[in-house]
Image: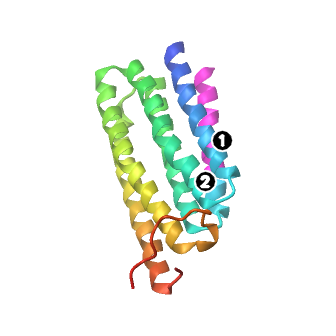
Amino acid sequence: MSTVAALVALAGVAIVVLAAVGLLRFGTPYARIHAAGKASPVAFIIVAIAASAELGWSGAAPLALAAIALLLTLPLAVHLLFRAVHASAPEFDPSIDEIPPPAE
Amino acid sequence: MIVALAYAGLAVAAAMSLYRLLVGPTLADRIIALDLALVCLMSAIALDAADRGDTTWLNLLVVIAIVGFTATVATSRFVERDADRRGVR
């Protein structure tokens, strides 16, 4: 693997490690989901860019497909997770809560 | 050398998210920890393909992304419906 591609991949891995540190250290579920869910698609895209530069078109096609799938699905999943935390754990509510209570 | 460092970083990140998967107080913590572990696995597969110049396993990445998304959506819908039924809020 060429040095430049390896360094770019290492940058992506550093973002994954930062996301994992946030997931490990933050205090509330909202903060943990925020740290882990928003950094991870970016990290995978950077690693995928490094790998595509190394592999050429035959490797770039599935990598781009996977990156697009992750980029489309992960924000949706994180949004649903936030809704689940909000519905199931009122003790973690932030001081400002603009979601209306469910209709009876 | 640099690639070995990247593998080690992925292993550390996966270990941290597996710790959160085992400990995490709420169910949502466990779900997002599993998601981050899957992203670590996907990055490791991409890195391995680039390292060895072998594109065989790259097709797995799309499958892992879609399956992980389906699991997250199903479980968070389940958590939300369960909270509604118990009348948490």
Subunit bearing disc 2 = A
- Of residues A100 and B69, the one nearer the viewer is A100
Q: Look at label 1 and name its amino acid.
A: Val
> Disc 1 designates what residue?
B12
Q: Is B7 within the magenta?
A: yes
Q: Tag 1's secondary structure?
A: helix
For the point 57% across and 62% down, the residue is A96
Residue B38 screen position, x and y as percent: 49, 48
**Which residue is painted at 61% across and 62% down in the image?**
A94
Residue underneath mark 2: A32
> Does residue A61 show up?
yes
Distance between the Cα atoms at labels 1 and 2? 17 Å
Quadrant containing the N terminus of chain B in the rendered view: top right
Q: Nearer the viewer, mark 1 or mark 2?
A: 2
Q: Main secondary structure of the magenta part?
A: helix
Magenta residues, as a range? B1-17
Q: Position of residue A85 (x, y in %)?
A: 53, 67
Along the viewing direction, whichever of B6 and B77 lies nearer the viewer: B77
Do tag 1 and tag 2 residues touch (Cβ < 8 Å)?
no
Q: Is residue A1 visible?
A: no
Quarter of the image where one finds residue A45: top left
Q: Secondary structure at mark 2?
A: helix
Q: Position of residue A34 (x, y in %)?
A: 55, 50
